[in-house]
Image (tube, grey):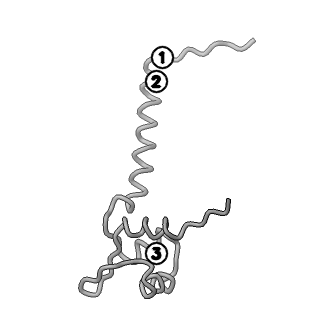
């Protein structure tokens, strides 16, 4: 027969604090998704693509961009739209 484990209010409070800490850590690690505008290096890192692949997406019109003073920016919503429009369903 198994012994019963009693969970106290303090145990629940400690669990809650650990859970909130874990959630905060996950959210802070993935903060690029909260930014509206991403630089080329951020986007390449996020999508795990090469500079050449990103250039091809720009050149062939697949991904809209904004260029200001030599720096290229990508709107996060445009990135999501591109991914959705190019999604395959092999069902």
Nearer to me, 31 or 60: 60
Which of pointers 3 and 2 indicates the residue nearer the eye? 3
Q: How many marks?
A: 3
- Quarter of the view holding residue 10: top left
Q: Badge 2, how many Cα within 10 Å: few under 14, some, many 20+?
A: few
Secondary element at image label 1: loop
- Quarter of the view holding residue 32: bottom left
Q: CA distance from mark 1 to mark 3?
A: 48 Å
Looking at the image, is 24 positioned above or below residue 19? below
Q: Would you say the residues marked 1 and 3 are in contact, meaning their CB atoms lie under 8 Å apart?
A: no
Q: CA distance from mark 2 to mark 1?
A: 7 Å
Q: Which mark is residue 12?
A: 2
Sequence-first disc among 3 and 2: 2
Q: Which mark is residue 44?
A: 3
Secondary element at image label 2: helix
Nearer to me, 4 or 59: 59
Give x and y (percent) for residue 65.
Answer: 34, 79
Q: CA distance from mark 3 to mark 2?
A: 42 Å
Q: Badge 3, how many Cα within 10 Å: few under 14, some, many 20+?
A: some
Which of pointers 1 and 3 indicates the residue nearer the eye? 3
Give x and y (percent) for residue 57.
Answer: 46, 82
Q: Which mark is residue 16?
A: none
Give x and y (percent) for residue 49.
Answer: 52, 76
Secondary element at image label 3: helix
Q: Which mark is residue 8?
A: 1
Left/right placement of residue 49 relative to residue 5 reads left
Give x and y (percent) for residue 30.
Answer: 42, 57
Nearer to me, 67 or 83: 83
């Amino acid at each position: 027969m198994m012994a019963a484990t009693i969970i106290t209010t303090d145990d629940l409070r400690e669990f809650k604090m650990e859970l909130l800490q874990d959630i905060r850590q996950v959210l802070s690690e993935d903060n690029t998704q909260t930014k509206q505008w991403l630089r080329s290096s951020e986007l390449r890192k996020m999508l795990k693509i090469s500079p050449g692949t990103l250039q091809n997406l720009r050149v062939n019109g697949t991904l809209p961009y904004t260029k200001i003073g030599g720096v290229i920016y990508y709107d996060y919503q445009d990135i999501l739209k591109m991914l959705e429009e190019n999604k395959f369903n092999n069902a």
